[in-house]
Image: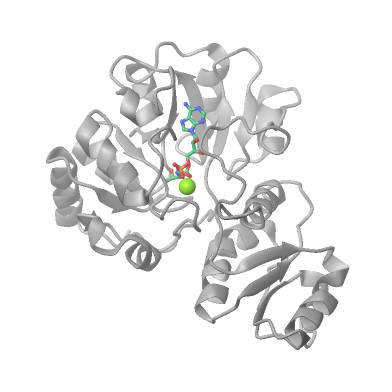
């Protein structure tokens, strides 16, 4: 933990005063506000440029507080909370009266999680309440995984930035609809479907790729400035070189099977073979290719197992149609 106690106290004070604090979690950096302060929550939407109908996740300091924020805790939700918190799992449950409708985008359900990061947990403990926080990026763009990314995205619009070093998971939490008896994944993330199935002892459906069930998910999300084009892994090099010849500034996410191969492109990032390392690096790679001036990124999808499911979901959405299209 790189933050000092005085910084944590200062950040908690900013939250109490209705301000916004960017803070590290194990997944990505969050842009936090006092979840019970409607005006502060409204500012989060404004700073992000996010439509107010898109609900936020409420971060709490421990699973024992879950009942304070939701109407009831079904047995399955309790099991998941006990098994995966603190950790990259978000439970969607029926909204408790303490949660303002501003935080849920008007929904009668609320998303809650306990982040697994010492700085986030210290902040939540010092503050004492719930912190409503989306990822600390502008709406639709790549989530920040370092404090520098937050400053580059949001600059002075944030009242205080806690620096907890680079995020260890690197992709957002898995969101589970836990309102009914059969929980389903609304957004794949840091907790894998396989881990969920092992704990629940049955198959878990992933809704996100079939139908848009999570409000606030637009086709293009998690997107760098450069256009992202997905091709089969064995075609990445040929497609990249072709596009470069056509005059594009091409960035390449080079699959492990091509490791070390020379590629005639503007910028090349070698994708790690381990899915955990790929997830940790993914958003940084996309930012790096933007920074190096790429106009086009050629990439392929990993096998959709384990963390590969979340990585593929983010790449697909980065490659989705842009709002102007
Ligand atoms: O890892 C994470 O989840 C990060 C860190 C900061 O905790 N947060 C994050 O927040 O990714 P955000 O706002 O970028 O994404 C939250 C997602 C949105 O897609 C939103 O639609 C969904 O959670 N969500 C929130 N409340 C919901 C609800 N009641 N029902 C369904 N989806 C909900
Ligand atoms: Mg986000």
| Count of numbered circles in the view | 0
Q: Position of residue 261 (x, y in %)?
A: 80, 84
Q: Residue at x 59, y 78 (%)?
A: 294
Q: Residue furthest right?
A: 234
Would residue 47 be found to the left or right of residue 314 on screen? left
In this view of the protein, which residue sits in the foreground, 105 or 284?
105
Q: Position of residue 59 (x, y in %)?
A: 36, 36
Q: Position of residue 239 (x, y in %)?
A: 81, 75
In this view of the protein, which residue sits in the foreground, 251 or 219?
219
Q: Residue at x 56, y 40 (%)?
A: 217
Q: Residue 163 falls in which quadrant of the image? A: bottom left
Q: Residue at x 35, y 63 (%)?
A: 147
From what the image shows, is residue 44 above or below residue 298?
above
From what the image shows, is residue 66 above or below residue 151?
above
Would residue 171 be found to the left or right of residue 139 on screen? right
From what the image shows, is residue 308 above or below residue 41?
below
In this view of the protein, which residue sits in the foreground, 267 or 261?
267
Q: Quadrant of the C terminus?
A: bottom right
Q: Is residue 106 visible?
A: yes
Q: Is residue 263 visible?
A: no
From what the image shows, is residue 179 above or below residue 223?
above
């Amino acid at each position: 933990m790189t933050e000092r106690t005085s910084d944590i106290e200062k950040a908690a004070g900013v939250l109490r005063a209705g301000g916004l604090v960017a803070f590290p979690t194990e997944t990505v950096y969050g842009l936090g506000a006092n979840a019970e302060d409607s005006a502060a929550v409204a500012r989060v939407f404004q700073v992000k440029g996010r439509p107010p109908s898109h609900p936020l996740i409420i971060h709490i300091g421990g699973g024992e507080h879950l009942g304070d924020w939701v109407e009831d805790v079904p047995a399955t939700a309790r099991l998941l909370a006990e098994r995966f918190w603190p950790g990259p799992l978000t439970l969607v449950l029926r909204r408790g009266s303490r949660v303002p409708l501003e935080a849920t985008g008007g929904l009668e359900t609320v998303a809650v999680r306990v982040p697994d990061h010492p700085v986030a947990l210290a902040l939540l403990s010092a503050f004492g309440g719930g912190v409503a926080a989306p990822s600390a990026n502008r709406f639709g763009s790549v989530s920040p995984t370092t404090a520098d990314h937050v400053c580059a995205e949001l600059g002075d619009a944030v009242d205080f930035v806690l620096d907890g070093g680079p995020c260890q998971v690197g992709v957002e939490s898995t969101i589970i609809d836990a309102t009914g008896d059969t929980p389903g994944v609304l957004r794949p993330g840091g907790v894998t479907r396989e881990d969920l199935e092992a704990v629940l002892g049955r198959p878990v459906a992933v809704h996100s790729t079939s139908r848009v069930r999570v409000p606030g998910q637009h086709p293009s999300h998690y997107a760098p400035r450069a256009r992202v084009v997905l091709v089969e892994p064995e075609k990445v090099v040929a497609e990249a070189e072709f596009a470069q010849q056509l005059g594009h500034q091409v960035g390449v996410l080079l699959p492990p099977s091509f490791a070390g191969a020379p590629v005639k492109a503007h910028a090349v990032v070698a994708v790690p073979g381990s899915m955990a390392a790929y997830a940790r690096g993914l958003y940084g790679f996309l930012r790096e290719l933007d920074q190096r001036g790429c106009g086009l990124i050629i990439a392929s999808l990993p096998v959709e197992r384990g963390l590969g499911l979340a990585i593929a979901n983010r790449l697909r959405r980065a490659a989705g149609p842009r709002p102007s299209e």
